[in-house]
Amino acid sequence: MEFTFIANGHKNVTSKHKSTFEITTDKSLTLKGDCIIGVNSTKTLNNLPQDLRTKIQSDDTKIELILETVNASDKIIGFGSSKLSLDHPSDMVCRKSDFTCSRTLMINCDKAACDLNPLLISDLKNGCELKVTIKI
């Protein structure tokens, strides 16, 4: 199962957070948002397809998240959980920990914002389009 959507980079992407990264529908970003790598997302947790939501809300479902810009890509491995509500209206967060809340897409990820490909982050700082693919 695979689902793709688009977000955008922003000049204030710093990608310094050590335990999470986030994609949001918000249009702007301040320098305080050091986990946010994508803004103006075309999708939210609320409007992921139901069959995908069902898989993500299953304990130990392995999830691959592929991030792609014009010059770079990265792959993050994480897991779903029955504790995920997937109902936040704007934010989609991937976490290295097993913490869950309405903003969480996947837990126990192998990468946070600070671990992402530097070329990908450079593209995002320059406002490049970000293609996001969720694979189950």
Image (cartoon, helix red, strand yellow):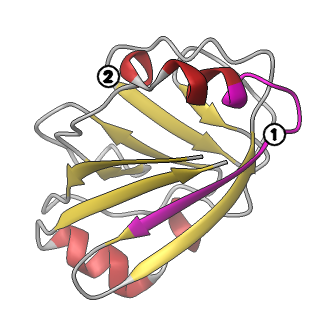
- Residue that protrudes farthest toward the right in the picture: 60
- Which residue appears at 50% of the width and 75% of the height? 74
- Which residue appears at 14% of the width and 69% of the height? 128
Query: Which amino acid, by three-letter code, is at mark 1?
Result: Thr
Residue under pointer 2: 90
- Per the image, label 1 sits on a secondary structure element best described as loop
Q: Residue 98's image quarter? A: top right
Q: Is residue 130 left or right of residue 46?
A: left
Residue under pointer 1: 61
Q: Residue 69: where, in percent of width, then height?
A: 27, 74
Which segment did they paint magenta?
Answer: 55-67
First reached walking from the N terminus: tag 2 or tag 1: 1
Q: Nearer the viewer, residue 27 or 19?
A: 27
Q: Residue 81's image quarter? A: top right
- Per the image, label 2 sits on a secondary structure element best described as loop
Visible in this render: residue 116? no
Above or below residue 76? Residue 22 is above
Query: Which amino acid, by three-letter code, is at mark 2?
Result: Ser
For disc 2, the neighbor class at 10 Å (few under 14, some 14 to 19, many from 20) is some
Q: Residue 14's image quarter? A: bottom left
Q: What distance separates the C-alpha of mark 2 from that of mark 1?
A: 23 Å
- Which residue appears at 58% of the width and 30% of the height? 52
Q: Nearer the viewer, residue 126 or 128?
A: 128
Is 92 magenta? The answer is no
Q: Are marks 2 and 1 in contact (CB under 8 Å)?
A: no
Q: Is residue 23 left or right of residue 116?
A: left
Disc 2 vs disc 1: which is toward the camera?
1
Above or below residue 71? Residue 96 is above
Q: Residue 124: where, in percent of width, then height?
A: 23, 68
Which dot marks residue 28?
Answer: none
For disc 1, the neighbor class at 10 Å (few under 14, some 14 to 19, many from 20) is some
